[in-house]
Image: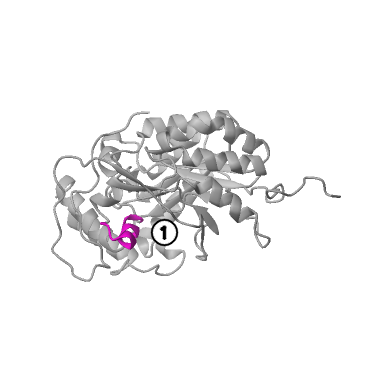
Amino acid sequence: MRRFPGKGSDLNPLSRFEAVQREKLEFEKERKRISVREDNSRSILTRNLSPDIPFSVSINPYRGCDHGCVYCYARPTHNYLDLSAGADFETIIFAKRKSAVLLRQEWQKRNYTVSPIALSGITDCYQTIEEKEQITQSILSLIDEYNHPVTILTKSSLVTRDIPILKKLASKNLVSVSISLSSLNPSLTARLEPRASTPRARLSAMEELSSAGIPTGIMTAPLIPFLNDNELESVLKAARQAGALFAGYTILRLPHDVKEIFADFLEREFPLHKDRILHKITEIQGESQDSAGEFFARMTGQGEYARMLAERFRIATKKLGYASFPELNVRAFTPPGKSLNLFS
């Protein structure tokens, strides 16, 4: 699996929650080494009440993400740890090594209600340190043991490592996997997502998953005006040819420090297009993108441009024969300590 050694952000702005704010600090030009720390959270499930997010519960095995995607909406979550949304987010990673233990405890609660668990809702469950940490793999092994439905979203070809587990889950209609792909241009993705898998590797992962009988889809995300939006149809076509059965998309949103980080990235990489891109994003998402905004509109934007993208997506997915996202089995789950015998 090829990985780019670069960094995503040159900035390391301080947390917005610090009492005293200082001027932004420029991140050193050399890549900072990734530091992995243990996350001692006492719960593992994150509940979601937003109606425009297609899951109600998720697990994030990691806090922070070493993929270094410069546009990542999750970057500001590092502020809650008194760390920066910039360089800290992609180099100081917290690993939830007790995830499987905590998940088993959740399932033993009498009031537990089964709903597909999303891996991950915030940061990539197959980011590069997963190859060593194997936290996601341990969660999937537990999910397989107790027949719990799960959905996966990743931009890493490392997901193919777990095909043996995913294949068993698929045979029981307990899993779907979505691969996130923003562009087919490796030069662009190397700058936008410096340590994520290449477009070719992600398409190959789709082929492997699909060939193994695992329901696989594509998320063309995020679409960025004047940067990758022209690739919408070509990405959908390439993914369909690779075996993707269902598709989704989102338009870029820049909450809190992400706006500053992304603007700095554009100044560095695409200075002639910076103002045009930022102006269009503001037109689509509004002046302030810090709050959730209107449900549903925040994912696909508002205005003529957003409507045009929605129509292009609709036409392309219909032409290519994409289906709806699969409904997973929520009735096969057997909580730890409970018998499979219905008459026991």
Residue situated in front as seen by the camera: 54 or 318: 54
Q: Secondary structure at mark 1?
A: helix
Residue type (three-letter) at the residue carrying disc 1 = Thr
Residue that appears at 26% across and 61% down: 257
Q: Look at the image and tell me in which quarter the N terminus lies.
A: top left
In magenta segment, residue 292: no
Left/right placement of residue 128 relative to residue 266 reads: right
Magenta segment: 74-84
Residue that appears at 28% across and 69% down: 287
Residue situated in front as seen by the camera: 178 or 339: 339
Left/right placement of residue 39 relative to residue 170 reads: left
Left/right placement of residue 315 relative to residue 252 reads: right
Residue situated in front as seen by the camera: 126 or 306: 126
Query: Percent from the top left, x then y, of residue 325?
Result: 57, 48
Classified by dominant secondary structure, the portion drawn in magenta counts as helix
Q: Which residue is mark 1?
A: 300
Identify the image's colour scheme: rainbow, by chain, secondary structure or one colour. one colour
Query: Percent from the top left, x then y, of residue 329?
Result: 68, 48
In magenta segment, residue 78: yes
Query: Percent from the top left, x then y, of residue 290?
Result: 32, 67
Q: Badge 1: few (under 14), some or many (20 or more) residues near its Cα, within 10 Å?
A: many
Residue that appears at 36% across and 44% down: 182
